[in-house]
Image: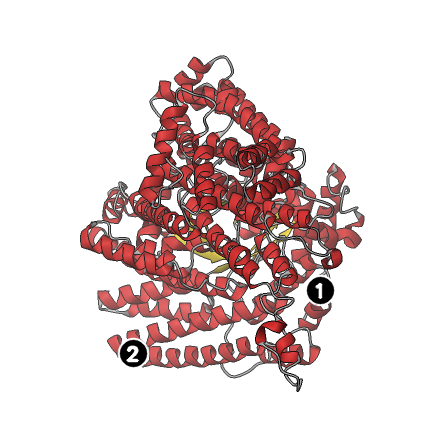
Amino acid sequence: MTQKSAQNASDLVAALKRHQDRAADDPHINPVARLASELFLALEAGNASIDDLMAAAGDLGDDAFEDRARSFHQRRKGVAGLDEILDGLASKGFDAFREKVERASAGVVFTAHPTFALGAAKRDLIARFPQDGGAALKNWREELARLSGAAKDDITLRYEHEEARKAIAHVQDALRALNKAILKKARHAFSDEWIKLRPNPVSIASWVGYDLDGRSDIHWGETIHIRISEKAAQLRYYENALEKLARYTGDEELSAMRETFAAAAALAEEQAEAFSGDLDDPAVVTPAANLLTGDKPGRLVSLAPFIGRLEEKIAAADDPDSKASLILLRAEMEACGLGLARIHLRVNAAQVRSALRADLGLDPDTGFLGRSALDIAAKKSTEVKKRAVNFGSVFLEKMTARRQFMLCAEVLKHIDADAPIRFLIAECEAPATVMGAVYLARLYGVETKLDISPLFETPEGLESGGRFLERLLREPEYRDYVSARGRMTIQLGFSDSGRFMGQCAAGLSIERLQVLFARALAGAGMTHIEALIFNTHGESMGRGAHPGSFADRLNHLATPWVRSRFAKEGIALAEECSFQGGEGYLHFQTPELAVETLNLVWGGVVTQNTGDANDRYYADINYSWDFYRGLKAWQERLFQRTDYRHVLSGFAQRFLYKTGSRQAKRAKGGGFDLSALRAIPHNALLQQLGAPVNVSGGFGVAAGREMDRLVEHVEGSKRMQDLTVLAAHARALTELSVLRAYATLYAPAYWSQLATAAQGEPHAEAYEDVQKALGEGEASAAFHHLTDYLAQDFRRFDVILDALGKKETAVHRDRLCALHAIRQALMAKAASLVASAPPFSRRHDIAHQDLIAMALDWRLEETIASLAEIFPARSDAGAVFSALEEQVEDHAFEGGAYPEIHTEIIEPLRKIAAASRMLAQGIANHYGAFG
């Protein structure tokens, strides 16, 4: 490649491949760094433009987006269809069929995680991907190209809630279709018994607007507003459904029922509006609360009487179609209640402990860990007297956890008295915290409708989770509580555990805890209650999404072995999985996708439940756990490495952009704390550096000197094969030459060599200034040291993958490398542009070297703003002195204006800043998710 740089995407990839061929014979050549340097020098020489590179990056990113859309649809194929599943269940007889379709053994939960990197229009484009290609694909690509300049979505909590409501509306339709298919099959297979069915195959839930873990920006009044608005929407659905049913049957009572629901919907809409004002003002809260709590016409807080009347009508109806329609409406009322979905409230364990400090007399930091703490909490819960609350209590309460329990009480009293509420406790590592939550539930009179669920997501929480559950279940008061509820619920976090201990080790540890959950229930004699596991995961490999089929995805969250362990103990198991933010909602973007997704989720859970005791992973569990410990240890060492923290805390953070309303970091004092960085930005950073090592790393070192044994272990184990596919796919998208290229870009020696080569030219001084700004090259050293650490593991892992025949060919790795080379060229250009700015006065409170350092730290917006302030585009002097009688030429007022700085430096920097987001999206598309 000459200094007359490649001008399009295909030329860039071809140039990269030529450098790769040369690198095979010369280890000093880094193909990515070489291409990046050539592109940068071409920009400097005027042989390429920023616009050229942006166009090439756009084409590469669009290619990746197309592949992402195609892969999204392909992974959903190759599984049994709904008819086949229902035929299989019906063949086992009515009782077996009934058991599978009347208990929600599967559930979908919509969360508000910040994964709205793709706007709604692009999500819709993925949903409408034309799998046949041809002219339809050409039109699709043209539509994609038009979206590149579209305005970005304004991501607020209200936006996230509206997107969640759209997804929930689609999944509700899908659940109606599934229930209808179940009844149709039952009518055909069990002509005398089908009317006994109460279909309830899948639960639907949401925590959008209800999750307060790590965020303080959701006002309690917003939560109430959202809950009432959801009630109003569901009441309108019931109103319309009853109108159609009354028209079909001619039943006047159904018409009267419709009028009741219409009045209730109107009142709920009025109540929701009342709770949309300034609820920090007691004068606003009081009338809103009175409207909600008063005995107004149209007040409706329970569907029980209406469900009872529907049952009578089902029994009395002669027409089978009328019976079926009534059964389906009853099923929806029982499943959704007075809301679009069941709600999950979530707080942090620290918030619960703080709320309990005075009542239990325990130190919230240390007092909950001892054995006596659980006894104290249990004893307190037996003595508690119910405390009445109203919205004044809610308004005045300062403790977040207490206020959430109060909100539960108000919801159950005044919005929906029947639907249970999930109360999730994040970072819960002490049984006393759960028992203390039971005490608070009893204090506020909500224990009969509240499922309190601890979340296990840290290495410590997962490792000790089995003992946690055993200890909790030994407590009679807790057993009484879950027996009364009929279920025990836990939440397992793939995202956070994946960043601390690596996704593969996290998956193994979570599977172990799921099995221990079954044992703990059996050991406590609690096999009569349902075990509910909420597996919280995202859409990327680093957050628990297996890259294989949809069945592989479900079986990574809860393996067939886990399901078989609960079956062995005679315990009914329910599995919920999360669909997080925009990328999760994509599975429900259209009615057709929603039907497909819901059928995949339910079908996977009810059919994939046979464990293989001969699977070598389980048969040779000692070796399996030696491997697990080695894998986990490697990932934990990685997380603690100084160079890893340096790499993730530096300029790469500016590659990310806003993808949700939640903050990227948990609130902690002091400087950068990697443990405070949330899972989504943590994964996004690794993706943006071409190194998803929390998935791909550790296998080689964990195998030790017995690589052959690990190969044999994988070959004899479906469980290990699935895990290896996950790591191998991430390995195919891990490119160490990209990391080393960033090291080169930030190496003072590189800029020194540029200055020497440019001696006598205008750029030489600018290159020297960049070299000085890089100091001792700490960033470069960190990248090199981290890459060396990773390379030791990958060399071994690649040998293992070759032996297994599972080494994936580069999944468009050349395209990915080309995008990084473009980015690095633009980063170098940005540094050069800023360094070439003329000297300026210290009165601006910033030095020239500070500006260069800001550019190198990729704080482009700040850099541009500072330059624009120092070098304004025009002077206002002409306007100020326009009233002077003594006239001069216009150019006399040009002092203090620097239009050439804007043309030559600031405007190019603006283009580079715009390109940064485009490049980040293009790179993320290779991983199927942002973060």
Give the image location of residue 425, x and y in percent.
Answer: 61, 49
Residue 221 in view, yes or no: yes
Give me the residue at 65% from left, 32% from top: 642
732 with respect to 466 (left or right): left
User: Which residue carries the number 2 mark?
Assistant: 251
Q: Quadrant of the N terminus?
A: top left
Front one among 184 and 212: 212
Front one among 646 and 128: 646
120 over 697 or under it: above or below: below
Q: Nearer the viewer, mark 1 or mark 2?
A: 1
The image quarter in which residue 122 lies: bottom left
The image quarter in which residue 10 lies: top left
Residue 558 in view, yes or no: no
Q: Residues within 10 Å of mark 1 (few under 14, many from 20)?
A: few
Give the image location of residue 81, x and y in percent.
Answer: 25, 46
Q: CA distance from mark 1 to mark 2?
A: 45 Å
Labelled pair 1, 2 in contact (Cβ < 8 Å): no
Q: Residues within 10 Å of mark 2 (few under 14, many from 20)?
A: some
211 over 78 or under it: above or below: below
User: Which residue carries the number 1 mark?
Assistant: 387
Q: Secondary structure at mark 2?
A: loop
For badge 2, the amino acid type reads Asp
Front one among 812 and 199: 812
What colour-coding does the image apply? Answer: secondary structure
For badge 1, the amino acid type reads Arg
Give the image location of residue 794, x and y in percent.
Answer: 47, 24
Q: Which disc is residue 108 wearing?
A: none
Give me the residue at 62% from left, 39% from top: 768
Give the image location of residue 341, x and y in percent.
Answer: 46, 61
